[in-house]
Amino acid sequence: MQSWRKNKLVFAVLALPPTAWLVIFFTLPLIIMWVYSFAERGPQGQIVLALNFANYVRAIEWIHLGIIWKSVWIAAITTVITFAVGFPLAMGIAFAPARWKNLLLLLVILPFWTNLLIRTYAWIAVLRTRGFLNFGLEWVHEKFSMLLAFIGLPDMMGEFQALELLYNQKAVVIGLVYVYLPFLVLPIYATLEKLDKSYLEVSLDLGAGHVRTLFSVTMPLALPGIVSGCLLAFILSMGTFLTPTLLGGTDSEMIGTLIARQFSSSRDWPFGSALSFLLLYLTFIMLWVRASLAGRKGGPI
Amino acid sequence: MARDRANPLDYSRKTWMQLALAGTFLFLYFPIVSLVAFSFNDSKRNITWQGFTLRYYEKAFDNAQLHEAFLNSLIVAGISTTVSTILGGMLGLSLYRYRFPIQGPYEGMVHLPIVIPEICMAVAMVAFFATVDMPLGLTTITISHIAFSIPFVAVVIRARMAGFDQSLEEVSFDLGANQWQTFWNVTLPYMKPGLVAGALLAFTLSLDDFVITFFTSGPGSTTFPIKIYSMVRFSVTPEVNAASTVLIVLTLALTLAALIIQSRSQGK
C-alpha cells in the first residue's frame, strides 16, 4: 500500500478509466432512476419530471404493500427451508474425512455454475403436470392399486390426479431454495470448519447428547456463519425476478416481477423506479446488518 | 482414552447423516442430470426413456435463430471480456496498491454491481439508455455486461496481487526502469494468471447473464439465454434440453479452467 500522492499520474492512469466506466454506466443510471422515482407518469407512459413522493406513497398502498410483504414472506420461508436443508449439508461436509471434503464442496458449488435460467427451466420439467415428479407419483399410484387388487381389496385409490406443482408459490420457493442453497452452505461450512472440535467433545464427555450438543454448542459457535448465510439467502431471494417469472403463477408476484412489469407492460417507469429503490434500500439494510454482525463476531463476510 | 472407540464427532459415518447428504445431492442434481439425459432421449414426450439419439442436437445446430443467438452471445461476451478484463485489472491493481481519500465509499461504489439485485441494475440501465437516447441492442447489452463484470475481475486481480512481493518493483526502479517498463516486465507477468482467471470469469458471467441482457436487448439482438428463455416459455422440448446442455458444458469447462489456473497460480 502506498499513498496516491506518491505518484499521482500513475494513480490517475490506473484508476480513472475503470472509475469513469462504472460512474457513467452504473452510478449514473442509478442516479437517473432515483430522479425518475420522484417523477410522474404521463398519459402515454412518458416521464414527467416532478418532485413528489407520490410513487413511494403508492408503493405502500395495500395492494403493493401486499406484494412487498409477500416477497419478504417468500424470502423468509425460502431462508428457513434452505437452512433446514443446508445446515445438515454444511455439517456433513465439515465433519467428513479430509479426502472427501473438497469433492463434496465441489459438488455443492457445481450446479451454481450452470446457467440460472437453465437450472430454473430444469425444474419446470420436474414439476409440470406431465413432469417427472407426477410421473413418479403416478407410477407409485399404479403399483399400489395393483397391490390392492392383488390382495383382493376394493380399489379405493381411484384415478390418479396429477398434482398442480408448477406455477404457484410452492414452486417459486422450491426454485429459490435450489438456486440459493450454495450461498447459505458455504459461509456455514466455513465457520464449522474453523470451529474448535474439542468444545463438542467436551460437551459429549460431560454427558450431553448429540442433539443437545448440536443446539447448545455447535449452533451457537457457528452463529456468525449461520447469520451470514441466512441473510445472504434472504437478500437474494427477496430481489429475485427470474424464478417467480418462470415457476410462479398469479399468486406469486414479487417485488422483482412487479418492478419488471412497470418497465414493460405497465409502462410506469417512475413507479418502477420507486419500487426499485425500495428494494435497494431493503437490500442495503440487510447487507449492513450482515456486515456489522460479521465485523463484531469476526465471522466470515 | 478416546482411541478405543469410534470418534463420536465422525458424523459422516452416521446413517442419518449419509441419508441427509444423499437426499440433498439428489435434490441438487436430479433436475440438471435429467435435463441433460433427456436431451439424448428419442421421444418428443420427454418423459419416458425411448432410446439414445443425437437428433435434437442436430436440430438445435440446424436452427438458424439459435445459431444467430449463439453468435450474438459470443460477440457480446468477447468484447465484454476484453474490456472488463483490462478495466477490472486496472481497478484491482489500484485498489491493491493505493491508499486514497474516500477509499471506503469508493470501494463500496465499485463493488455495488456485485451486490445489488440484478433487476434493479437492469431497469436502471433501461432508464439510462432511454435518457441518453441510445437504441437498445448488442451495444447496450455489451456496455451493461462490462459494467457488472469489472468489479468481479477487480476482486480476482486484487486477490492475486495480495501475494505479490513489492520489493520486486523497487528493485526494478533501482535498476533504472521507468514506471511503464516496470509494469510491463515485472508487475504484469505476475498478474497474468489472475488476468486469465478474471477473463474466464467475465466471459462466463456474460454468457450466462439473463436478467440484465433481457432488459437491455432490443429487436434483433437476441442472445443465447434469451433465445432459450423464449423457447422455454412455450414448452419443454428435447431441443431446448440439447441447447441448454451445450451451454452447461461450455460454462462448466470455462469455470473449471479458471479454477485450475487459479489454484496453480496460488500453488506457486
Image: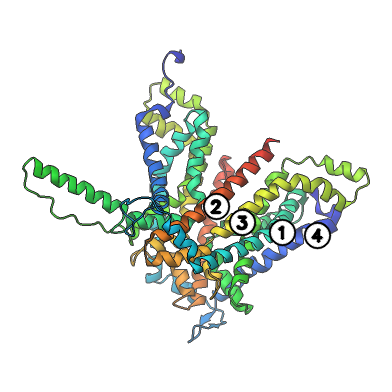
Question: Is residue A193 rendered to the left or right of residue B258?
Answer: left
x and y percentages locating residue B88 in the rendered image: 69, 56
Q: Residue at x 62, y 64 (%)?
A: B75
User: Do callouts 1 and 4 point to residues on the same chain?
Assistant: no
Q: Nearer the viewer, residue B202 or A244?
A: B202
Given the image, on which type of amino acid does mark 4 rest?
Val
Give me the disc on residue B251.
2
Q: CA distance from mark 2 to mark 4?
A: 33 Å
Instruction: Name the residue beneath numbered marker 4.
Output: A13
- Which structural element holds mark 2? helix
Please give the chain letter of the residue carrying mark 3: B
Mark closer to the observer (1, 4): 1
Instruction: Name the residue beneath numbered marker 1.
Output: B87
Q: Residue at x 54, y 46 (%)?
A: A293
User: Do callouts 2 and 3 point to residues on the same chain?
Assistant: yes
Mark closer to the observer (2, 1): 2
Given the image, on which type of amino acid does mark 3 rest?
Phe
User: Do callouts 2 and 1 point to residues on the same chain?
Assistant: yes
Q: Nearer the viewer, residue A95 or B149?
A: B149
Give me the disc on residue B213.
none
